[in-house]
Image: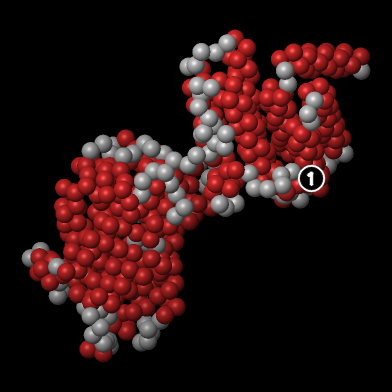
Amino acid sequence: MSETFDLWKLIAGLGIFLIGMSMLEHAIKALSGRTFRRMIRLYTNGRFRSIGSGTLVTAILQSSSAVSLMVLAFVGAGVMSMQNAIGVIMGSNIGTTLTVWIVAIVGFKLKIESFALPFIGIGGIGLIFCDSSDKPKLYQFCRLLIGFGFLFLGLDYMKGSVESLGQNFNLSMVPDYGLWLYLVVGTLLTAVMQASAASIAVVLTALHSGLITFDIGVAMVIGANVGTTITVILGSLGGIPAKKRVAFSHLVFNIITGVVAFLSIKGLVWLITLFVDIQSNDVMGLALFHTIFNIIGVIIFFPFIGLLAKLLYRLFPDHKAVLTVYLSNTPTEVIEAATSALRQEILHLLHECQLYGLRLLDIDKQLVFDEDLPLEKSARKRLSVESLYEKIKLLHAEIFAYYSKLQSQKLEEGEAKELERMIFASRNIMNSNKNFKGILHDLEDFNGSENVYLNIQYKSFRKRLLKLYHDMRGIQGQESKEEQYHSLLKAFVRVEEADKVCITDTLKAVAEGGIKELEISSMLLVNRLFTQACRLQIFSLKDLLLSQEQISNFDRALDMKELLDEEKGKES
């Protein structure tokens, strides 16, 4: 063994430990992730149950951050109350101490090679011979074995890197900066690694090797508990107020618990000595301290969960964003004005959906729109594809809610039919958007494919969409409904012709061997959904702009075209 401190061995050990934790967490989530999510969602009704569920799930998953992020998601989705979320987070702090107990008992009491290497060997061989698609459970179980083995192999490396240094290390050489400095070090260490178990494993290793005193180890463990809140805070950034409330509750709980524990270090250390001889078994004593001070935190906060929840609602109130442009200031009692506002709002919805289509195909929006659309203006930033889709859904929901209010008014038959056509147009727009969303990944594959034909078709889809949007913008600018009627028919015919050209080109590519069998299926499916999305947008504009008589003529013209196409098909 080397007589000097081996920094790279320590870093390698820490890296292996973190890889082991990550593999262990992901394997357990893959094996039983749905069960844990169901437990968090269903078995958190009440303070005791929420704390118990948080403790149990975290103890199994070995990651308080993973559980806290689940809580963020469920609170954001509105399926978990704030009080129950606080209970789960409090329980997760207790559950995460199990990792420390396992490391303290197994990692420092038994010979690691005797069980860690067999786990890695069996898991690694199993992973090579298992197919993740054919035997997903067995594949994940092998990952679990490797993760468990890596966890302790990394710990062994860390121990080995400092053991020789610890034998000749004199604690009196360390300047006495006060325990608060080590509290900060523990916080920063965990914030950087985003894993309190890993930073506590480093502390346990240093304590076991005699590099730090028990009091310093205690201060660093308290800091690690505070540092683990960083992951949840990062997960809530830019999120809805509900997610910010969860993250802040985690921060408040851990900071106040940490302050109480730090101010009570001497008393808590005395309490530990009643159960463990910290002179001969300091690692076990530190694990017990970690558990006790988290339990004390739960006891302190338990009566104030409701009060904390109310405070968080005041700090982070729900601000309902007004997504509509024309409906918010138009009362439903004035039918004519409300009908006009609804039509304009649905046209606004169409434009936002067209922007979504442009984003999917990476087309500059300035080729269609001269300025930012209202959803991005209100957000004051460029929205991601996912955020834009969610806001469009909310906008559609507001449109439908307004339509429902209009239905409660006394409407004449003509007014009712007009409103019905408009809401049907909005549904067509949303179905079009859903089609585009469904082919997003296929289009990305086409763009990045090594197949030249798929690259060409990707560019063709971009040209087809841009042409359609230019046609539709031109139609909306026309003053005569008769012009709009004929222009819509022409736009529809162009969509159909582009669809046929794509199918013909694909058949030709198949015959020439320019496209593989699996790619044929993807190509035809994408073309069908893309064409259908284009049709739906034209249909929505038809219902919004044309008169009832023109709409009927339009539908008859399409029916006649289909009949003529069928006849041509029979003749050929």
- Toward the bottom, the furthest residue is 173
At 22% from the left edge and 47% from the top edge, which residue is drawn?
307
> Is residue 20 rendered to the left or right of residue 86?
right
Image quarter for residue 22?
bottom left
Total marks shown come to: 1
> Is residue 400 rendered to the left or right of residue 248?
right
Taking the image as drawn, is residue 373 in sight? yes
Rendered position, 559 above or below 134:
above
> Is residue 435 rendered to the left or right of residue 261?
right
Determine whether the residue tagged by mark 1 lies in a helix, strand or loop: helix
Q: Position of residue 259 (x, y in %)?
A: 21, 65
Residue 282 vs residue 332, the one in the foreground = 332
Image quarter for residue 547?
top right
- Toward the left, the furthest residue is 274
Quadrant of the frame with the C terminus: top right
Q: Position of residue 229 (x, y in %)?
A: 34, 59
Residue 173 vs residue 283, the one in the foreground = 173
Quadrant of the frame with the N terminus: bottom left
Residue 30 vs residue 477, the one in the foreground = 477
User: Is disc 1 surrounded by few (<14), some (14 to 19) or many (20+) residues within 10 Å?
Assistant: some
The amino acid pointed to by label 1 is Lys
At 53% from the left edge and 22% from the top edge, which residue is drawn?
334
Q: Name the residue under label 1.
A: 459
Rendered position, 328 above or below 212:
above
At 53% from the left edge and 39% from the top edge, which residue is drawn?
323
Taking the image as drawn, is residue 493 in sight? no
Q: Position of residue 128 (x, y in %)?
A: 53, 52
Q: Position of residue 220 (x, y in %)?
A: 27, 71
